[in-house]
Amino acid sequence: AGGVIGWTGAIAAFGPFLFGVGLTMMSPTAFYTIGAVWAVMCIAITWWRYARPGAPKKS
């Protein structure tokens, strides 16, 4: 389990870096719009896989 925690922490450390790079490459409005669309897509996929009636990985 320690390896998974370390790997997750290492990947999570890129978040602030990628956030800053994204904001410098495009306008803040475009960046946040893309982020909002990404979040909605992730929510929809998670609901489809785990929460909908008849989901294959019901938890």
Image (cartoon, rainbow, N blue to C red):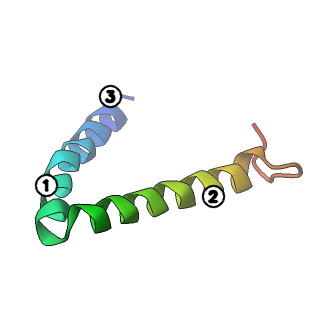
N-term mark: 2 or 1? 1
> Is 35 left or right of 40, judged from the image as shown?
left
N-term mark: 1 or 3? 3
* Residue 3 placement: quadrant: top left
Farthest residue to the top: give it: 2
> Is 7 left or right of 57, judged from the image as shown?
left
Neighbourhood count class around disc 2 (C-alpha, 10 Å): few under 14, some 14–19, many 20 upward: few
User: Residue under circle 1?
Assistant: 20
Residue at x 33% of width, y 32% of height: 5
User: Residue under circle 2?
Assistant: 45
Q: Is residue 46 above or below residue 10?
A: below
Cα distance, mark 2 to mark 3?
28 Å
Residue in the foreground of this view, choosing between 23 and 2: 23
Element type at mark 1: helix
User: Residue under circle 3?
Assistant: 2
> Could you tell me residue 36's position as x and y percent?
44, 57
Residue at x 19% of width, y 49% of height: 14
* Residue 19 placement: quadrant: bottom left
N-term mark: 2 or 3? 3
